[in-house]
Amino acid sequence: MRILITNIKQLCQVEQGDANIKRVSGAEMAELPSIADAWLMIENELIHSFGPMGTLPAANADKTIDATGKLVLPAWCDSHTHLVFAAPRETEFVDRIKGLSYEEIARRGGGILNSARKLNAMCEDELFDQSLERLHAVIKTGTGAIEIKSGYGLCEEGELKMLRVIRRLKGQGPATIKASLLAAHAYPLEYRENKEGYIQLIINKILPRVAGEGLADYMDVFCEQGFFGVRETERLLEAGWKYGLKPKIHANQLHYSGGVQVGVKHNALSVDHLECVGDAEIEALKGSNTMPVLLPGAAFFLGIQYQPARKIIDAGLPVCLATDYNPGSCPSGNVPLLISIACTQLKMTPEEAINAVTINGAAAMELEQSIGTIAVGKKANIFITNKIPSFDYIPYDYGNNPVETVILNGKLI
Ligand code: NIG
Ligand code: FE
């Protein structure tokens, strides 16, 4: 099966020759290699070839799409979400408007514990159906690959139930999915006076079962004051590594928690959130392979300080953006909106923001060899926009969906 897309106004984020880009950092992030007036050929599930219209081959295609006035980009790679959850938390949203903080709500047994109560009361099938609906909704706004965490079970059966739902979503296609075990998201109420007991439950019971069933790709911990401290995080990450689960952790969201340093020390694939980042955190990240992942949608929704993206990029580091889609701090998995927030609030340029949620998003899920750019031999995970003037228009036209057609694994969705 061959799909040919012709007259593409701009084919964005292309990789030509044998560049084999793994991630883009610092000043490189300002470049978004593109071809004006282009064609793209898809063969089965892969990108077969592309080039400027002047080089269009005479080859036959089973289907031809005329993309006059439209752009083509690689599908978004959203490397941090909590898309599997049982219920929204709009009453806490109103509590915050009236002055309660996110941490205060958590101390009162709301927040993550509220989500855990609802999730544990819901059967796996219902959880799956709801989650699948959310997945389809984010695909419509251009997402092609997504990481999804557990962390609303906070007990053996609940965590396994969430991860089995994620496995079913993986099997469902068409998105590429990675799963992270986030049992260390909060201490369940029954362990509030026995925190050591919960750490041991994760290390000795939950982790072996999750690894035994092959349910997770990564190990996550919410390293934060009032949640899991540096010492607990270290023990959990070491335990995860014993089963081959690389860390991808929540770090430095509400405080200078030491999360970035502990993540780097334990070779984390990524450290995510990073509202609280100073010189020490930047120094720790330099010379490491750990990807800094910024979640400005959560800072926007909680009304807290934004991540210092400029400082991180100007230090020569890569920046990745992800939605953090979850019912508490960011009930939106909309990547175009995330890009608008990154541009307006973090002062990232559209080129930087698009790099951050394509190739760098792929790298934060170890998928940079197969997705994240338009390159020959990569998976045909792309989208065609509406008729728009340029890629700058994507963050400019905030709140609207630029995506007209999504193609994942070479199939029209
Ligand atoms: O990434 N910060 C910790 N975890 C999530 C929020 C979880 C929730 O409030 O349900 C986050 O923001
Ligand atoms: Fe998160």
Image (tube, rainbow, N blue to C red):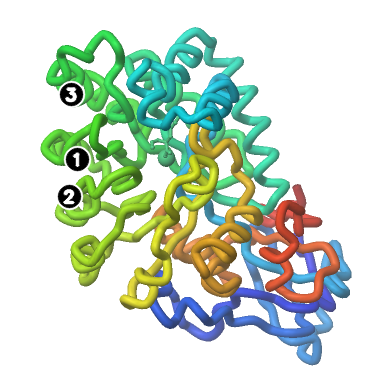
Residue 89 coordinates in the image, percent (x, y): 55, 23
Residue beneath disc 1? 237
Quadrant for ligand 1 reads top left
Q: Are marks 1 and 2 in contact (CB under 8 Å)?
A: yes
Q: Quadrant of the N terminus?
A: bottom right
| Res 84 visible | no
Residue 125 coordinates in the image, percent (x, y): 58, 15
Q: Residues under labels 3 and 2: Cα distance?
A: 17 Å
Dot 3: element: helix
Q: Amino acid type of disc 2?
A: Val
Residue 43 coordinates in the image, percent (x, y): 69, 64
Lateral position of residue 9 relative to residue 175, left or right:
right
Residue beneath disc 3? 199
Residue 297 coordinates in the image, percent (x, y): 53, 48
Q: Quick one: label 3 or label 1, which is nearer the N terminus?
A: 3
Nearer to us of marks 1 and 2 is: 2
Tally of numbered tags: 3
10 Å crowding of disc 3: few (<14), some (14-19), many (20+): many
Viewer-side residue, 11 vs 230:
230
10 Å crowding of disc 2: few (<14), some (14-19), many (20+): many
Q: Amino acid type of disc 3?
A: Ile
Residue beneath disc 2? 262
Is 281 above or below relative to 114? below
In the image, the residue with mark 1 has its CB under 8 Å from the nearest atom of ligand 2: no
Residue at the (42%, 74%) spot, across then down: 24
Q: Are marks 3 and 2 in contact (CB under 8 Å)?
A: no
Q: Quadrant of residue 228?
A: top left
Residue 395, numbered circle: none
